[in-house]
């Protein structure tokens, strides 16, 4: 700890920088059972994102600069991720105006385990519909909904005919049993 303290005093606290109340014991932080969700970090207040509290910042603020000055506090960006950091989530948003596409790349690193860090990557694409494309989409969706209504009516009609034939003791062809089941499965798949 003393070696790290000396290194910090030499590297980070040399003139013109000043480190107020830096003690050798403060070089290594220990996590506690209580979370400090109201404490600011690098001049950032904690925010709720996907049911968890954390600190959100633009990546270029941390990656492109060695130091940050916020709220009258000077901080080294190399200390943004420290021993108390349990997860890191990077969200990249790409927009292509000509194609009307939005792509979100989400990199999630979980460092809460003592064994190793686990990383997951998610990519989502979203298409922006407007003008003619939006009108065509709405028209096609209307046709799909009308088709589902017709299919449901046909299913009930076939079941009614099938029930009446069975009550009269008539022989029922196997196609008459398969058709409503096929239509029901098709309607469910279209809805889902």
Image (tube, rainbow, N blue to C red):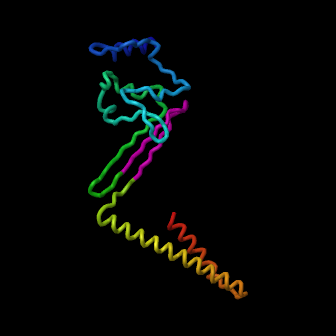
Please give left or right for residue 52 compared with residue 45 in the image.
Answer: right
Figure check: 89 above or below 159: above
Residue under the image location 67 percent in, 85 percent down:
165
- Depth order, front residue of 97/14: 97
The quadrant where residue 68 appears: top left
Q: Position of residue 27 (x, y in %)?
A: 44, 17
112 magenta-colored: yes
Figure check: 81 above or below 26: below
Please give left or right for residue 77 compared with residue 109 in the image.
Answer: left
Q: Position of residue 39 (x, y in %)?
A: 44, 26
Figure check: 167 above or below 189: below
- Decide whether the magenta segment is chiefly helix, strand or loop: strand
Q: Across the whole image, how many numbered discs are drawn on residues?
A: 0
12 magenta-colored: no
- Depth order, front residue of 132/81: 132
Residue under the image location 42 percent in, 35 percent down:
47
Q: Position of residue 8 (x, y in %)?
A: 38, 16
Residue under the image location 27 percent in, 14 percent down:
16
Figure check: 26 above or below 86: above
| Stretch in magenta | 103-124
């Amino acid at each position: 700890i003393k070696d790290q303290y000396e290194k910090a005093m030499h590297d980070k606290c040399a003139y013109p920088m000043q480190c107020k109340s830096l003690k050798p014991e403060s070089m290594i932080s220990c996590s506690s059972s209580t979370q400090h969700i109201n404490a600011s970090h690098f001049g950032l207040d904690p925010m709720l994102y996907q049911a968890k509290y954390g600190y959100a910042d633009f990546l270029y603020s941390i990656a492109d600069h060695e130091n940050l000055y916020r709220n009258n506090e000077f901080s080294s960006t190399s200390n943004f991720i420290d021993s108390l950091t349990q997860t890191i989530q990077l969200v990249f948003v790409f927009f292509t105006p000509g194609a009307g596409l939005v792509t979100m790349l989400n990199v999630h690193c979980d460092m809460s385990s003592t064994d190793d860090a686990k990383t997951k990557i998610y990519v989502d694409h979203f298409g922006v519909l407007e003008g003619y494309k939006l009108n065509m989409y709405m028209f096609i969706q209307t046709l799909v909904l009308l088709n589902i209504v017709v299919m449901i009516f046909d299913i009930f009609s076939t079941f009614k005919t099938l029930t009446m034939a069975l009550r009269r003791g008539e022989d029922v062809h196997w196609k008459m049993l398969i058709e409503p089941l096929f239509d029901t499965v098709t309607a469910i798949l279209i809805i889902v």
